[in-house]
Image (spheres, rainbow, N blue to C red):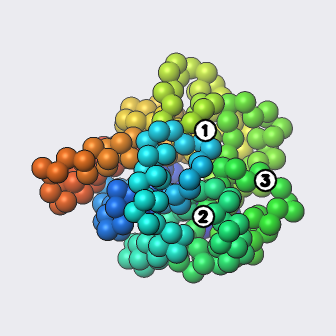
Amino acid sequence: MSHFSDLLSQVSKRGERSLGMFVTSGFPDMKATPDLLRAIDAGGADFIELGMPFSDPLAEGLPIQRSSERALKNGVTMQATLAFAKEFTSQSETPLLLMGYGNPVMRYGISNFFRDARSSGVQGVILPDVLPAEDSPFFKAAKGHDVDLVCLISPTTPEARMALIDEMSSGFVYAVSVTGITGTDTGDASPILSYLRQAKATMRKNPLLVGFGIRTAADVRQLSEHTDGAIVGSALINHIEALWNDISISTEDRLKSVETFVRELKAGTLAL
């Protein structure tokens, strides 16, 4: 069991599901990122995903696309993202994962990236466009530097493929709730719940967390029924964007609002 899997197991023993929150590095501005990480942590998130902005994200809906564009215009770099991670993990025991795409990691140098991620206190990495394979340089480097590399499944993933992904993944398996992009409305939950039940029954090695289209504590509660927790991204990005676009709101009040937003979502993981 990885360090991250062990954390999720501890949350489960408390009678809760885990809540992960996604925020884009360098969004809405460079100064805000460390404060937002602390606010999300204070709100009770069990772990945080820090997005590595990329100009051509394949699985992101408009909110996260906009946040990446804004972050890149702000001048965010991989080095800055790793520095944000290091600052946060030096002050908090809440696990931090990095989420992004393979191309920027390749430009940085795959082994160098996982080495520097580990030295920055990062526990795991999610790269949706990197396919699981034992001979993959991504998987070799992640294992060599003791960093979990999380794999994804979707409603169209065959059961045999789910089992293979469970074997290759470390930390947890990320169940995309719907076929589409982040922020997609989940619509009728019945087929999603059926898919999550099947996926959970297939897992032998890893916890299963669900993401995409989760906006409220009710969504978290419903979709966590057959998983080990939920991940919220686009809804938080929308919330942050609205707060920072309103110049009448002070920075202190913005951060308090983010903390409250996370706390309300975390309530959906309790006493399931």
Q: Is residue 263 above or below residue 252?
A: above
Q: Is residue 60 above or below residue 94?
A: above
Of helix, strand and loop, which one carries label 2?
Answer: strand
Of helix, strand and loop, which one carries label 1?
Answer: strand
Q: Amino acid at mark 2?
A: Gly
Locate residue 89 relative to residue 122 in the image: left or right: left
Of helix, strand and loop, which one carries label 3?
Answer: loop
Query: Residue 157 versus residue 166: which sits nearer the camera?
Result: 157
Return the residue at label 1: 176
Q: Position of residue 154 (x, y in %)?
A: 67, 36
- The quadrant holding residue 75 is bottom left
Q: Residue at x 34, y 61 (%)?
A: 29
Return the residue at label 3: 132
Q: Residue at x 57, y 36 (%)?
A: 181
Whether label 1 touches label 3, CB < 8 Å: no
Return the residue at label 2: 124
Locate residue 172 relative to residue 265 in the image: left or right: right
Sequence order check, earlier mark of 3 and 2 = 2
Distance of label 1 from label 2 (alpha carbons): 18 Å
Q: Is residue 162 above or below residue 48?
A: above
Q: Position of residue 79 (x, y in %)?
A: 52, 75
Distance of label 3 from label 2 (alpha carbons): 15 Å
Q: Residue at x 70, y 66 (%)?
A: 106
Q: Position of residue 172 (x, y in %)?
A: 63, 53
Q: Amino acid at mark 3?
A: Pro
